[in-house]
Amino acid sequence: MRMVQVQVFAVLKNYFNQEFEIKGSVSTIEELKKELEALNPSAAKVLQACRFAVNDTFVQGEYKLKEDDKVVVLPPSSGG
Amino acid sequence: MRMVQVQVFAVLKNYFNQEFEIKGSVSTIEELKKELEALNPSAAKVLQACRFAVNDTFVQGEYKLKEDDKVVVLPPSSGG
Amino acid sequence: MIKLWSSPLPAAVDLPVIVQEPIPVIELFALAHHPRAGGIVLFSGEIRNHNAGKEVAYLEYEAYTSMAEKMIREITAAAKEKWDLHVALCVHRIGRLEICESAVVVITAHAHRSEAYEANQYIINRVKHEVPIWKNEFYTDGSSQWGGNCNCH
Amino acid sequence: MIKLWSSPLPAAVDLPVIVQEPIPVIELFALAHHPRAGGIVLFSGEIRNHNAGKEVAYLEYEAYTSMAEKMIREITAAAKEKWDLHVALCVHRIGRLEICESAVVVITAHAHRSEAYEANQYIINRVKHEVPIWKNEFYTDGSSQWGGNCNCH
């Protein structure tokens, strides 16, 4: 079974632990996003606005997750 | 006879003394400009681009000179 | 003093771009003088005592540091090439910041001033909109709010 | 430290705007922080080592000081009102300046950054084009030339 590590930032820490693991059938970023929405439906709106990155590179919804990929979930920037 | 004090700046110092007096028939700034051109024809082009001020206020060609007015002649700005 | 322009490749890549401590604005500005530059523009994004009608007590900034550093370096490098800048620097602070402290500083230097202004705005706009850095505003009423809108534009 | 924003009327009118000595950029920047300002823009117009294809050794600036001071104050006051700035400062140096030294510094502070940039450019553009200050460029070949064009734009 595939295991994916997830790290979230900023406002997402109000909805999830900062780091956790997802085991099971998620095979793409799009599926991971759905899984996260299922885990906490109140985070759905924020998740829709988020960017995802693997190995410090942005990835799109169709990106195929590999074993032990660490996915970071990045809410809209608010620096500066 | 009217006496007008004149002070020039920057590149005009290559053509005139920094401060001097003009006695005689000049009654407006326009006439003063013509007088200065007559004094040094090579300054004509620069003088056309200059602004004139009396008492720290810009004056136009039709300004009527008064006795002992001090006129400053200001080439185009090149500060900054 | 280190001179950014004395080395063949800009030493800017070695400067930290994400810092925990107060941004050394004065030292950065001192680094940014360049004998071919006629105009230097420095932008400092500072903590306001109010936002969206609420009184701000302080802010905390968080970054996904590894990506944020890489992206800030890419953005300043892109600006440097696009406008042929002599200097392009950006430093962003994270952690707790008080009112009037600088959260981000951008410095650009160009032979002519209009390019220095334009490039400076390009850098801060991209940094604010693209780089994974977030502010958490703590208000004097005890509440707090993660930023998600660009409040300072 | 003097705080420009602590007095009901801006203390800026009391700051010198034409100076013979190096412009105290750091001190001016320190004065410009304001608890309601989210963006501070500082422009420094510096002496380049080249102009119009010639190598510059140094510059001398001359001003018709009484009018120049009055006009710079009017220009910064106009910008302050037009954009509702928290801070608007301009200081111009005269006399002999070396390469990399600041001839003019403009600082603007506003709640939002785009206004701070825009007002800053407005001030420097008007100061360069309108205020009776002139540069005399001295080149390394021993020649010199009074400025009459705006070379740094």
Image (cartoon, coloured by chain):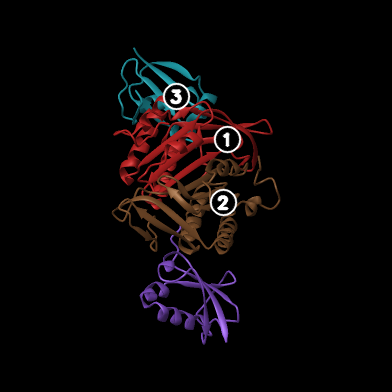
Chain colours: A purple, B cyan, C brown, D red
* Within-10-Å neighbours for mark 1: few <14, some 14–19, many 20+: many
Which tag is nearer the camera, tag 1 or tag 3?
1
Residue D24, x across and y down, in percent: 50, 32
Pointer 3 local density, CA inside 10 Å: few below 14, some 14–19, many at least 20 = some
Residue C5 x %, y %: 66, 46
Separation of disc 2 and disc 3 at Cα?
Answer: 51 Å
Camera-nearest label, 2 or 1: 2
Would residue C118 be found to the left or right of residue B59 on screen?
A: right
Q: Which of B40 and D80 is in front in this view?
A: D80
**Placement of D82 over or under C119, stated as above or below:** above
Quarter of the picture containing the N terminus of chain D is top left
Task: Name the chain letter of the residue that bears numbered label 1.
Answer: D
Determine the residue positioned at 37% across, 57% down. Answer: C151
Residue C36: % across, % down: 62, 44
Kindly report the distance in space between the C-alpha atoms of the residues bearing marks 2 and 1. Answer: 20 Å
Mark on residue D101?
Answer: 1
Instruction: Please state which of the two labelled residues, at mark 2 or mark 3, is closer to the viewer.
Output: 2
Residue B76 visible: no
Task: Tell me where residue A41 appears, x and y as whole percent.
Answer: 37, 78
Q: Mark 2 points at which residue?
A: C89
Q: Which amino acid does label 1 sit on?
A: Glu
Q: On what subunit does the disc labeled 3 rest? A: B
Whether residues under marks 2 and 1 lie with C-beta atoms below 8 angstroms apart, the answer is no
Residue under numbered circle 3: B36
User: At label 3, which amino acid type do we have?
Assistant: Leu
